[in-house]
Image (cartoon, rainbow, N blue to C red):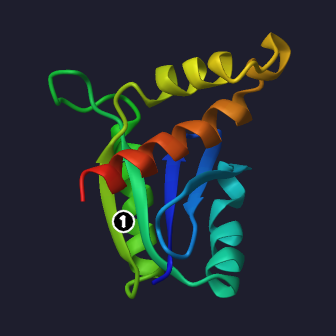
Amino acid sequence: MGRILGIDYGTKRVGLATTDPMQIVTSPLETIHTQDIFDYLGNYISSEDVEGIVVGMPLKSDGSPTDSTPHVIGFIRKLKKLYPHINIVEEDEAFTSKMAVQAMIDGGMKKKDRQKKGNLDKLSATFILKSYLENL
């Protein structure tokens, strides 16, 4: 078994999370500037056994696209072209940011640290990945 990456894609930052090799535990990994994501993924995928990638798909509560949806679709298209050997799937990212904020509060994170967007992005990616694994 290989790791599964969770991705919370944004036009400024990309939050990343990963599973352990047995795909049991999910952990926040990193927050990367969007322009650096493909370099980062190339290095990560070449050094780790990555079996799958789960990308959060931003949709409104009625299932219609948001302003961010076309960006994510383009990102997924490029991922599939670069990594045809890796299973790439979409997962609804509804409420992952709210869950991430609550997890930071519940975990006792100071307000100053909660305001760092990078922390929110990688925790959101963790919730996207966790949701995917729970629905398998």
Q: Most extreme residue toward the top, as rendered?
A: 111
The percent coordinates of residue 125 (x first, y second) are: 53, 45
Q: Is mark 1 on a helix, strand or loop?
A: helix
Disc 1 residue type?
A: Arg
Instruction: Answer with left or right where residue 86 lies relative to residue 61.
Output: right
- Closer-to-camera residue (44/1): 1
State the image quarter where residue 64 is shown.
top left
Mark 1 crowd level (few <14, some 14–19, many ≥20, 10 Å Cα): few
Q: In this view, does 31 lie above or below 81?
A: above
State the image quarter where residue 13 is shown.
top right
Q: Is residue 9 visible?
A: no
Instruction: Answer with left or right where residue 105 lies relative to residue 84.
Output: right
What residue is at 57 percent from the left and 40 percent from the top?
11
- Closer-to-camera residue (114/103): 103
Q: Name the residue under label 1.
A: 77
What residue is at 35 percent from the left and 36 percent from the top?
58
What residue is at 49 percent from the left and 74 percent from the top?
22
Q: Is residue 129 above or below residue 98?
A: below
The percent coordinates of residue 66 (x first, y second) are: 32, 28
- Which quadrant of the rendered structure holds the N terminus? bottom left
The percent coordinates of residue 119 (x first, y second) are: 71, 34
Instruction: Answer with left or right where residue 58 lies relative to residue 109.
Output: left
Q: Is residue 106 visible?
A: yes
The percent coordinates of residue 88 (x first, y second) are: 35, 69
- Closer-to-camera residue (18/118): 18
State the image quarter where residue 77 is shown.
bottom left
- Which quadrant of the rendered structure holds the C terminus? bottom left
